Amino acid sequence: MNIEVALLVMSESDIASGLKLAQLISTRGGFCFQVLVVGDQPAMLEKQIQSRLAGQSSATSAEIPVRSLPSDVDGLITHLDTLPALRVLLLPGLDQFNDFRKRIFRKAHTTVVCFEPHRGLEKEPDSLWLVGEDEGKFAQWLSEHVMAYPRLTPVTLEQLDQQQPDAAAESSSHGTAWQQQAAWVLLSTSAKSTDAASKVSKQAIEAAVGPVLLVRGESSWYQGLLERQLPALVQRYVPQMERAERQLLAEQLSKFSQLDFEFIALICASTFLASFGLLQNSAAVIIGAMLVAPLMTPILGAGLSLAHGNRPLFRGSLFTICIGFLAALTTSFSFGLLVCGLAPSLLAYAADGRVILTSEMWSRTHPTTIDFFVGLVGGSAAAFARTRTHLADALAGAAIAAALVPPIATAGLHLSLWTQGISEEGAPWGDTNLFFGPVLLFVVNMLTIMIGSSFVLWSCGIRGERGRPTRDRWATRMTVLLLTLTSLVLVWIVQHS
């Protein structure tokens, strides 16, 4: 039997009105439904439900399944996932919309109706009023297929309050007619607007005469993919970090993503090393500079902020990255000026007196698509190594692959050597932008590391809390913006390769 409607019972007060509404929906819509018991005393509640069903004259009442579930939201959601045909989850207690009911309302993957019968549940309503936007079209479906009304009547809370009969009209014939033709009120909302909807529902209960239902429409296909199917698939194949490990990693990345004296000192030292290596055409010295450079940590911190939806951390990490970039650029520029003024013998000159750049410097003036994927894989590897303590040795290799400081040092050296004139001798690509190219290479590495690390950290279990609409919207928009910028940079690189 395909269960299409489920009633969630958590207290004795949920039984009478809950069974009545569940049977009303299943009868009018021709649906099969079951009762899910969640509470401190599930055996007692289940016995009361069975007794009430046995006392009904309906022949189908005895066939209604009743199941007891653990008193936790995750266990309930897991059980709902085993019911592929489930369309509606009835959640009584709109007048007692506590944190537990709100969590179910947010996390349930099926459509949710949290209702308060008020009065008039057993009466035949003459109309259905809709408060709010029916984005998921579930309220319209409920109206057509269950309540037998082809259209909903949109109203506001102010209009609803004006329709309520006052005490003087209660005794009049108009008041009596109103009571006999009580309307149902549907409050349509989303899982991300639970707190606001609970406040509106209290106003609606006070203003309405008939039953009040808070309905949450079904998610779109892409929302279901991103919020349910993709996380479930990732959790199945990727080992998740423990809570203590997630907290420790978040604290470490947050701490070392802040701008301080140690960060400035390390970025200047690594830039000096990289400048030496670039002028001497020494790959070994450049690799040493990559190991000393601290820029990887704030970029990983920005990736963490995207995965967790932490806007202050992203702002602080981005500020640290920008200051680190300016410090490295200033250091390499100053180093180049010192070399030109005090030790020009370290430079090679062409016959026309212009400076001949080394191959290590030329190689960083023209980024290619390979650099794009190197940054993406290197950043992902660095983030994954941070999530596993026994893989700490892999961080050095990831830092070398990312190559964040050498491009900045190259740009600073090119600026300082500009007055000397730069020869194109040894340039494999001929004329190129000696400053824009290295800066673009750094931007490519930064964006790809940020995006790759955020996906890896999210896959390993670092995610934001559901039900935080502001945080979710910011993280989504920022991720889309970074993906768009990365795509534009990649297109430019492909066109100019």
Image: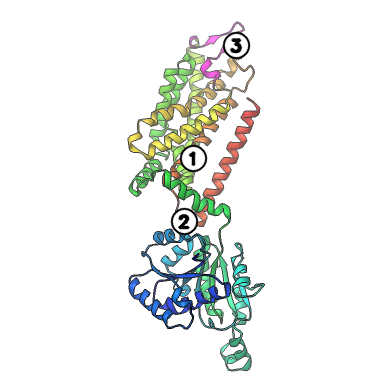
Q: CA distance from mark 1 to mark 3?
A: 38 Å
**How far across and down, in percent of the image, does residue 135 sit?**
61, 62
Q: For the residue marked with disc 3, what is the amino acid? A: Glu
**How far across and down, in percent of the image, does residue 206 sit?**
53, 79
Q: Of the two numbered discs 3 and 2 on the same chain, state the one appearing first in sequence.
A: 3
Which-is-in-front pick, marks 3 and 2?
2
**Residue shown at 54% from the left, 74% from the top:** 25
**Residue shown at 42% from the left, 58% from the top:** 78
Which-is-in-front pick, marks 2 and 1?
2
**Above/below status of 354 relative to 90:** above
The one nearer the camera, 330 or 396, is 396
**Residue shown at 56% from the left, 72% from the top:** 30
**How far across and down, in percent of the image, does residue 331 sit?**
48, 25
Can residue 121 be spotted in the picture? yes
- Tell me if mark 1 has few (under 14), some (14-19) or many (20+) residues whose alpha carbon lies within 10 angstroms of its own: some
Looking at the rendering, the stretch of residues picked out in magenta corresponds to 345-363
Q: Residue 319 bears which disc, if any?
A: 1
Q: Which residue is mark 3?
A: 425
For the C terminus, give its image quadrant. Answer: top right
- Tell me if mark 3 has few (under 14), some (14-19) or many (20+) residues whose alpha carbon lies within 10 angstroms of its own: some
Q: Which residue is mark 2?
A: 466
Per the image, label 1 sits on a secondary structure element best described as: helix
Q: For the residue marked with disc 1, what is the amino acid? A: Phe
